[in-house]
Amino acid sequence: MKLRIFIAFLLLSLTSQAQFVIRGKVVSGDNDEPLPFANVFLANTTKGATTNEKGAFVLPNLSPGRFDVVVSYVGYETLVFPIRTDSARISSYLIKLKPIANQLAEVRVKARRGEDWQQNLDFFIKNFIGQSENSRQCKLLNPDVLWFDDDRPNTILTAGAREPLLIENTALGYRVKYQLESFVYDYGQRLISYVGYPVLEVLKPKSPRQAKRWEANRRTAYFGSTTHFMRALHNRKLQEEGFEVRRIIERDDSVRIGANKQLKKIRMLLTDLLPYSDFTASDTVNSSLTKMAFQDLLQVTYLQEKEEINYLKIQSPFGRLPRGPGPQVSIMRLVKPYILVEPNGHYYEPLGLFFEGYLTWEKIAELLPLEYEP
């Protein structure tokens, strides 16, 4: 009996040590008035809350690690700050949000509707939620909060949202609340970039069959994803997890077109697998993090899943299949000196790493929370 009591006490102590709490109050930066129903959450997780009538909130039962705390309220600028939940058992904050300037607010309201609004909305959904099989089971519940600014003279399409976007994903069993900060499409370079902060709510399955289907779809979405790659990288298990990494050398070359010379990018793939020492190292400040730094480009191939048919069709200008599905191939480019990778697969700075290829195909429709483990 004494042994059982001791074991139970030990398990309770270990469990309590793993629990972390963030609490605080959200107020207006103008007059310190509390802001009720403000959104407070940890980005890319299922941990979120809204403030009460006094502006107070609590985020309990947090796992250890580094997260981005996101605080948003209609009419105010979104506040984002990092926190390590393993540095203290309880963290308390007084958060002051800054009102959005009236001029900027007026621009966004004016940009809400126009002749091309529906066309821009369709383009946004395809390039934000995606065009995969899962995207067909995703629905944007509040499209009217979006605004678009189509600047054709400068070949730039900009999108934003006055409130968090609400997306119901019945393929994976999540409702996503996405705080969109920017969405930009460059017509000339055919380049899309967007920045935002999601929090996910787990949906309740209607039947055991649906729950089983959701779990199968989540596993498919996870394997080969950026999170899967980063976790395997941190654990030095890339090949065991099905990834191959090679170096691509990119150089400028001049090509003569008629009487003129134009610069063109030339890429050469090195066939040998890249050793970890050529693109990773332990962080000198925090040894639990992995530093990812490399020259030129990385080609990342995931061997254990094939490309989606829809992906191949979009690659062909005529919508025809140029070949059968092959391994999922992506290209990574660093635009910062390095990024730091957490054990859970989260990495920062998120804008320090750009992707080409298959990983750009997997958008919000494949999004999973950082807590997900297959």
Image: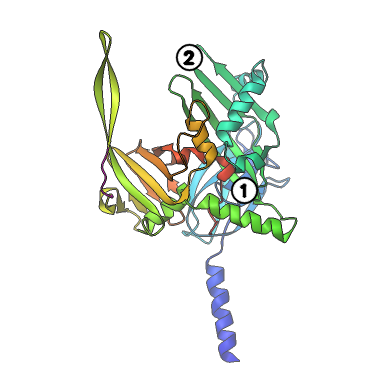
One can see residue 87 in this view:
yes
Residue drawn at 71 percent across, 46 percent down: 54
Residue drawn at 64 percent across, 39 percent down: 136
270 in magenta: yes
* Kind of element beneath mark 2: loop
Alpha-carbon span between mark 1 and mark 2: 36 Å
What segment is highlighted magenta in the picture? Answer: 269-273
Coordinates of residue 43 in the picture (x, y in percent): 55, 46
Residue under circle 2?
154
Q: Amino acid at mark 2?
A: Asn
In the picture, which quadrant includes the N terminus? bottom right
Tell me the crowding category of disc 1: few under 14, some 14 to 19, or many 20 or more residues within 10 angstroms, Cα based: many
100 in magenta: no
The quarter of the picture where residue 77 lies is: top right
Image position of 33 (left or right of 124): right
Residue under circle 1?
200
Q: Residue furthest bottom?
A: 1
Query: Is 129 placed above or below 147 here?
Result: below
